[in-house]
C-alpha cells in the first residue's frame, strides 16, 4: 500500500512537471531546448540570489559565474547595450527598436519586430494572460518554420529567440505575475513582460549568446525591484 502511494505521488509530480513544460514549449521548434537552458540558469539565480540586495556589477558577476557553472560561454553585454536596456525599461523607447540593431536581412528583421511588438503592446496593459502571448508567439514560429526564403542561420536565430521568449515569459509570469509590484520602476511595462523582453534583447544584441540573455534577465529583474 505504501509503495502504491509513493508511485501515485511520483506520477502526480511527473504529470505536473510535464504540464509545466508543455505550457511553455513548442515541439515544432527544433531549437526549443535553448529556452529550457536559459530558464535553468535563471532559476538558480532566483533561488540563491533573488531576494538579495545586489548592485548591478554583482548581478553581472554572479550571472557570469552561473553560466560557467552550467558549461555556458561567458556573457558579453557591453555597457552601451546595458544602457539601452535601461532606456527601454524606463520608457525612453520600445522593445521593437532592438530589431533594427540586429545585423540580419529585412525579412528576419520583420519577424523580430513582430516578436518584440507583442511585448510592446501587451506590456502596457494593466493585466495580461500568459496563454494569449504564448499563442501569439506560436503563430510567429509557424510562419518562420514555413518561410522557405529564410537562410538557415537566420531561421535558427529567430527560433532560438522565440524559444527564449516563451520559456522566459512563463518563468517570469510564474515568479512575478500581474499582481504585487507589477510595474515597480517600470514606467509603462508589466514587470514580468519587461524582464522577458530584456532576455531576448540580450540574446540578440550579443549575436546569439544565451549567457547574455541570462545576464540581461537577471540584470533587469534586479534594477526593477
Image (cartoon, rainbow, N blue to C red):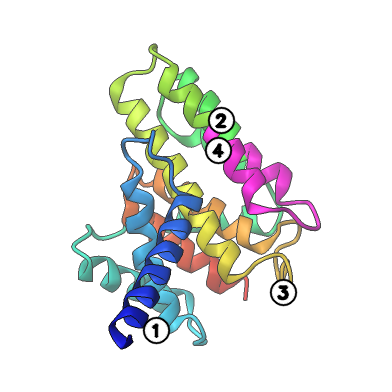
Is residue 78 visible in this depiction of the protein?
no
- Element under label 4? helix
The image shows residue 174 at horizontal and vertical percentages of 57, 66
Instruction: Give the quadrant of the C terminus.
Output: bottom right
Determine the image quadrant of residue 28: top left
Choose the circle earlier in sequence order: 1 or 3: 1
Choose the circle earlier in sequence order: 1 or 2: 1
- Is 151 left, or right, of 217 in this rendering? left
Q: Which mark is residue 48?
A: 1
- Is 169 left, or right, of 26 in this rendering? right
- Stretch of the chain drawn in magenta: 117-139
**Callout 3 environment at 10 Å: few (<14), some (14 to 19), or many (20+)?**
some
Q: Nearer the viewer, mark 1 or mark 4?
A: 4
Choose the circle earlier in sequence order: 1 or 4: 1
How far apart, in angstroms, are the residues tagged by discs 2 and 3?
30 Å
Residue 136 shown in magenta:
yes
Residue 183 shown in magenta:
no
- Is 158 left, or right, of 113 in this rendering? left
The image shows residue 137 at horizontal and vertical percentages of 55, 38
**Callout 1 environment at 10 Å: few (<14), some (14 to 19), or many (20+)?**
few
Amino acid at each position: 500500500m505504501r509503495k502504491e502511494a509513493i508511485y501515485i505521488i511520483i506520477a502526480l509530480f511527473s504529470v505536473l512537471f510535464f504540464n509545466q513544460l508543455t505550457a511553455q514549449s513548442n515541439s515544432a521548434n527544433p531549437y526549443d531546448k535553448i529556452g529550457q537552458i536559459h530558464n535553468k540558469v535563471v532559476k538558480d539565480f532566483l533561488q540563491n540570489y533573488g531576494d538579495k540586495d545586489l548592485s548591478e556589477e554583482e548581478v553581472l558577476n554572479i550571472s557570469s559565474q552561473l553560466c560557467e557553472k552550467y558549461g555556458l560561454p561567458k556573457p558579453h553585454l557591453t555597457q552601451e547595450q546595458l544602457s539601452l536596456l535601461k532606456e527601454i525599461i524606463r520608457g525612453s523607447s520600445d522593445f521593437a527598436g532592438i530589431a533594427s540593431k540586429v545585423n540580419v536581412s529585412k525579412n528576419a528583421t520583420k519577424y523580430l519586430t513582430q516578436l518584440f511588438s507583442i511585448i510592446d503592446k501587451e506590456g502596457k496593459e494593466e493585466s495580461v494572460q500568459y496563454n494569449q502571448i504564448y499563442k501569439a508567439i506560436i503563430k510567429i514560429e509557424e510562419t518562420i518554420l514555413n518561410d522557405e526564403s529564410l537562410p538557415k542561420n537566420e531561421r535558427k536565430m529567430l527560433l532560438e529567440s522565440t524559444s527564449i521568449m516563451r520559456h522566459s515569459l512563463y518563468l517570469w509570469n510564474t515568479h512575478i505575475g500581474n499582481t504585487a509590484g507589477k510595474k515597480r520602476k517600470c514606467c509603462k511595462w508589466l514587470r514580468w513582460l519587461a524582464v522577458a523582453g530584456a532576455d531576448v534583447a540580450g540574446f540578440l544584441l550579443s549575436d546569439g549568446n544565451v549567457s547574455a540573455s541570462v545576464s540581461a534577465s537577471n540584470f533587469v529583474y534586479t534594477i526593477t525591484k
